[in-house]
Amino acid sequence: MASTATRLLDRLSALPSSDESILSVYLDLDPGRFPHVRDRRAELDSLLESAQRQQLEAGCRSRSERLALLRDIEHLRERLAGRDELAPPSARGLAIFCSEAAGIFEVVRLPRPVAPAVTVGRRPFIEPLIELTAAERWAALLISRRSARVFRGTRERLTEVEGALDDVHRRHAQGGWSQARFQRGIEREVEEHITASCEAIFGHFQREPFERLLIGGPSELHARAQRALHSELRRRLAGHFEIDVERSSADEVLHRALPAIEASEREHEDRALVRLREGMAPGDHASAGADEVLALLNERRVRALLISESYSEPGLVCPRCGWLTTNCDVTSCPVDHSMLERREDVAGAAIEAGLAQDAEVLVFHHRRAELADFGSIAALLRY
Ligand SMILES: [Zn+2]
């Protein structure tokens, strides 16, 4: 039932914006939070109710659109009716895209937990999926003396997170700030605003973790914000940049953030190359070149997959279990005997196989020439 994430992403992001509404659902299957099928069923029910509310609140939807959504919800419930559908082996989450009118029904098994989410819109909601297939998830806290915003995403795209700082805004709305203005010094108020924003982004991080954090805004506040961060976030801090907090668009934020993101990527790639060179000693724990690396992915022995963004090679993939090879003489999967599918490029399937075995996947954007010495694809092994 599951589609592979990277292939689907290509397809979904290429969809023209349609007149039909598309229902997008992200279901968290983390056994810590939703251990039983009945918990997951309740999670799904509450998301679907929220989809109907969202549509009602949007107001202007026509009767036929409301009926279309009800049909999609019904269809989705039917497809996820069985126990197994809500307890797929080794999946930590599901992404579902559904629109009968647009001819879409896709279920994607996710290798990592996601925050539960639902949208009804002209476009499928694919940002969480992009984040899941990216090696590093980034967040940027923009903070000025008065306001704060949170963006998150990847080197490709940052999106503003609505509501990430709700607690801070709620306190504003309760009038605490304006009264405080008269009772206490402005500086103290700014300090409280910074502290509250840092607490709020830590809350957001606990719900939806990210690997790296940037602070943006006037430079005079960077050190103060850094001090106010929870130690867990300070550890993830990758840099600062100056930006107009109130007026900048998501593209401007990404533009300012990119030098820090790229610097961090270069460091990350350099460290991985050191580990790779050390591990390449005979009998040691690294391996290079497509033949060996794909075989190790098939054996689920990969701890870190190093792959160049320019790596591309035709090959064959098992549609059932993801078994991979570049040897085009093989016809059926040695594990389950399914007919193998031909791919112009096995890079995406290799990345998915890595994610599915909880390997760190590092796509090289900078040190490609260095990785080319190892065939542009390499692995560090678990054992
Ligand atoms: Zn197979």
Image (cartoon, helix red, strand yellow):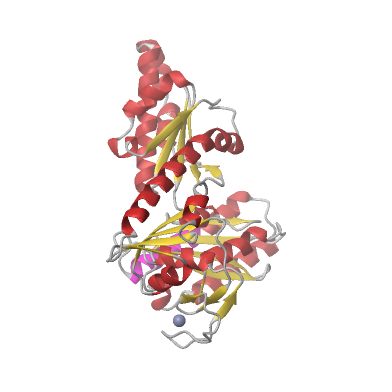
Q: Position of residue 360 (x, y in %)?
A: 38, 57
Above or below for 349 versus 163: below
In the displayed structure, would residue 200 be above or below residue 363? above
Q: Main secondary structure of the magenta part?
A: helix
Percent x, y for residue 382? 29, 64
Whether residue 109 is visible: no
Work out whether residue 85 or residue 254 is closer to the camera in this orientation and state it: 254
**Most distant residue in the front direction:** 282
Residue found 43% across the figure and 61% down from its top: 378
- Residue 339 horizontal/vertical position (percent): 53, 86
Magenta stretch bounds: 37-49
Q: Residue at x 64, y 67 (%)?
A: 68
The C terminus: image quadrant: bottom left
Location of residue 277 in the rendering, given as x and y in whole percent from the top left corner: 36, 54
* Total numbered labels: 0
Q: Is 303 left or right of 326, judged from the image as shown?
A: left
Whether residue 98 sits left or right of residue 17 in the image: it is left
Q: Quadrant of ligand 1?
A: bottom left
- Whether residue 54 is visible to the viewer of this picture, yes or no, is yes
Q: Nearer the viewer, residue 173 or 165?
A: 165
Is 143 covered by the magenta stretch?
no
Quadrant position of residue 61: bottom right
Where, by quadrant of the figure, is residue 225 drawn?
A: top left
Residue at left 54%, top 52%?
Answer: 127
- Of residue 349 and residue 116, the one placed in the foreground of this image is 349
Of residues 253 and 364, which is closer to you in this image? 364
